Amino acid sequence: MNKAHILHPASRSVKLVLEDGTEWKGWSFGSETPMAGEVVFNTAMAGYPESITDASYQGQILVLTYPLIGNYGVPGKQRENGMLQFFESDSIHISGLIISDYSFDFSHWNADQSLADWLQEFNIPGIYGIDTRTLTKHLREEGAMLGKIIFDDDIPFVNPNLINLVDQVSTKEIVRYGKGKYKILLIDCGVKNNIIRCLLRRDTEVIRVPWDTDIDTVEYDGLFISNGPGDPKQCVATIANIRKAIAGDRPIFGICLGNQLLGLAAGGDTYKLKYGHRSHNQPVLKLGTNKAYITSQNHGFALDDSTLPEGWEPLFRNLNDQTNEGIKHKTKPFFSSQFHPEASSGPTDTEFLFDEFIGTIQNSKI
C-alpha cells in the first residue's frame, strides 16, 4: 500500500486475495462485507455510476485504474420512462470495488450521496489505498482471475462463470416501454438502460422479456438481443430461441453478449478472453472499409468468427488484438456488435447502428 494515500480516521484495514496467492492490502470505504468473484479491470476515466450498475459486471470485483474515484458522488434517483435516469439498471451488480484513492468529499450539481454510502446501501465492499495500476498490470500478465475481499474470517473463491448469471439479472416479467411505430422485442440478458433509451428515441415500442422467453409468443417487428454477464453458452434457451428467429427474415440486432449469442445460434463458437475488454477507448475497424471507430466495451468472452457457417461473415474487428467485434448475415437483415454503441458514459461514435437497425425494420415492412 502506498503510504501517501489519504486515510480516513474510520477506515478499516482490508485485503484483496487473488487465486494465485498474491495479496493486496488497503482500506475499506464501502460495506464491511467479505465478497468473492472474478477480478477484472476498467481503464475508463469517468462513469463509475454507469459501470457499477451495468449487469455485465454481475459477480465481478471491479478494479478502476483512474486514480481518483468518488469526487463527483452518485447521481439522484430520478426516473424517466420507468428507468433510473442516470444509471444503467436499478441495482449495483459488482461484487466489490477496488480503487487507488477515494475522495471523501464529493461535489457535483447532480450528486445525491457519496459513493461510500451507495456501496453500503447495497452491501458492497470497497477498498482504497491499492496501487491499481500495478494490480492491473498483474491481471494483464496473468489474466483475469478469481479473488476475494477479506476482513477477518476467510471465505472460499467463487467462479461466477460457472453460474447462469443472465438468469440472475434478467427481468422476471414482460415490461413495455413507449408507444412508437415499430415493435422491438428485447431479449433481456442484463440490458443497459441506455440501450432502451436509444431505441425509444427512434419511434419504437420496446417489449422487454426474460432471457428464456419463447419469442414465438410475442408479436414484434425487430428482435434485439442485449448485453449481459458471463459465459454465453450458459444461455441455452436464448440460443435456441434465436436459432428459430434466424430461420425467418425479421431484422435482428445484438450488442455485446448479444453478438456472442447470435454467433452461437448461427453455429459458431465462443471462447474466454485472457482479461477481457473493459474500457472506453477500444479501436474497432468496420471490415471492407477504412473506417475505424472508438468504442466502449465490457466483456470477458469473444466469438470465434472463423467458426461461422456459410452465409455469415465478420462485420467489425478489434484493432488491438484482432478479436471479433460483430457479425452479419450476407443476405438477411441480421447483424451485431461486440462493443456498446449506446455507451454512457463513453464514446457514441457508433450510435448510428441503432438507425441502421430501424432502417432494416422499415425496409422489411415495405
Image: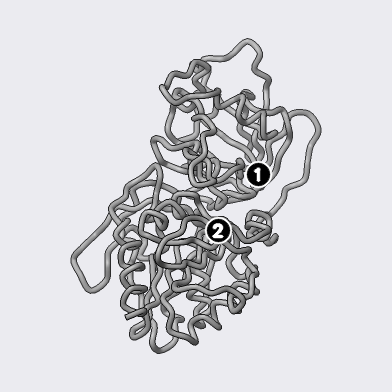
Which one is nearer the viewer's eye here, 118 or 25?
118
Locate residue 49, reporting x and y percent.
Answer: 50, 36
Q: Residue furthest left?
A: 290
Seen in the picture, residue 249 relative to 54 is either above or below; the reply is below
Q: Residue furthest bottom?
A: 310
SS type, badge 1: strand
**Neighbourhood count class around disc 1 (C-alpha, 10 Å): few under 14, some 14–19, many 20 upward:** many
Cβ–Cβ below 8 Å for labels 1 and 2?
Answer: no
Locate residue 84, reporting x and y percent.
Answer: 52, 41
Which one is nearer the viewer's eye here, 261 or 274?
261
Q: Earlier in the sequence, mark 1 or mark 2?
A: 1
- Amino acid carrying label 1: it is Gly
In the picture, measured across the screen, residue 335 lies left or right of residue 146, that is left
In the picture, measured across the screen, residue 230 lies left or right of residue 185, that is right
Which one is nearer the viewer's eye here, 234 or 254?
254
Q: Quadrant of the C terminus?
A: bottom left
SS type, badge 2: strand
**From where the camera sits, is residue 228 visible?**
yes
Q: Which residue: 47% across, 52% down?
A: 298
Q: Which residue: 24% across, 59% down?
A: 292
Which residue lies under the disc numbered 2? 176
Locate residue 314, reporting x and y percent.
Answer: 36, 75
Q: Which residue: 51% across, 83% down?
A: 267
Which residue lies under the disc numbered 1? 147
Colour scheme: one colour
Q: Which residue: 50% across, 66% down?
A: 225
- Total labels drawn: 2
**Neighbourhood count class around disc 2 (C-alpha, 10 Å): few under 14, some 14–19, many 20 upward:** some
Locate residue 315, reporting x and y percent.
Answer: 33, 72
